[in-house]
Amino acid sequence: MSHRYDQADIDTVYRVIAERRDIRHFLPDGIDPALLQRLLEAAHLGPSVGFMQPWRFIRITDRSRRDAIHALVEEERILTAQALHEREDEFMRLKVEGIRECGELLVAALMDDRERHVFGRRTLPEMDLASVACAIQNMWLAARAEGIGMGWVSLFDAGKLAALLEMPAGAKPVAVICLGHVKEFYARPMLEQEGWAKRQSLDDLVFSDAWGNKEKKQ
């Protein structure tokens, strides 16, 4: 008995993975509520260590609050540019978010009271963050399959954003998520297209038995 999917389905999975993009350019059209619900459900099906399900999603519907989030991101964008020193001007020319333009804005966060979840986190407490990242990736892939652009924005002061969104003590924002219709998907990752960085070779990142030992080609 084979548990393998049909080849066409397998090909689609790999295609969605390969064509996923971190989107910064959006059309102003809204997203159908049923579609948004599907994307949230895809995120909620993500794996989590100890089945703790630490993700929380806040939908931003108030325009003034959206503008306040944009201001926080702009503040951090300037500080990040200054920290980059010789690449400051190059960074400032990049479009790093689409908060004002996207059809839907969400904030993904870690829940509070995470310390009570010990299973899988006793020696690696950061696995709660890894679990939220898996949920976000689920949403990203589902969005791409639905033809919806998604951008993950991480340029913000977590404490300031938590205060703006009235999060309880212990909760922490992880991502500002921009969702929306797009004119087109980038042919390659935007930062690669803009010459900011290149994708590393997988051969340089896979080791055998110990760190640094390169896999031997068969």
Image (cartoon, helix red, strand yellow):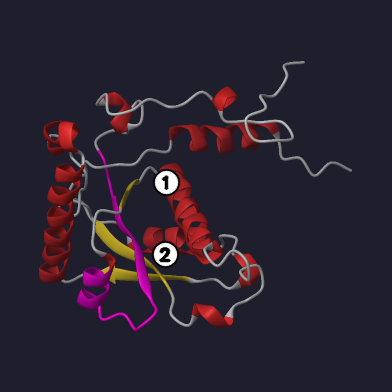
Q: Which residue is mark 1?
A: 146
Q: Which SS class for mark 2?
A: helix
The amino acid pointed to by label 1 is: Glu
Q: Which SS class for mark 1?
A: loop
Q: Which residue is mark 2?
A: 37
Vertical arrangement, residue 124 with respect to residue 86, above or below: below
Percent across and percent down for residue 37 are: 42, 64
Tell me the crowding category of disc 1: few under 14, some 14 to 19, or many 20 or more residues within 10 angstroms, Cα based.
Answer: few
Can residue 99 be seen here?
yes
Q: If the image is split into quadrants, where does the N terminus sit?
A: top right
Tell me the crowding category of disc 2: few under 14, some 14 to 19, or many 20 or more residues within 10 angstroms, Cα based.
Answer: few
Pick whichever, 194 or 19, lies toward us. Answer: 194
The amino acid pointed to by label 2 is: Gln
Q: If the image is split into quadrants, where does the C terminus sit?
A: top right
Query: Residue 191: within the magenta?
Result: no
Q: Which residues are magenta?
A: 159-182
Kindly indicate the quadrant of the structure image that contains residue 62. bottom left
Kindly indicate the quadrant of the structure image that contains residue 205. top right
Label 1 vs label 2: CA separation? 12 Å
Q: Residue furthest top?
A: 218
Q: Which mark is residue 21?
A: none
Percent across and percent down for residue 87 are: 18, 32
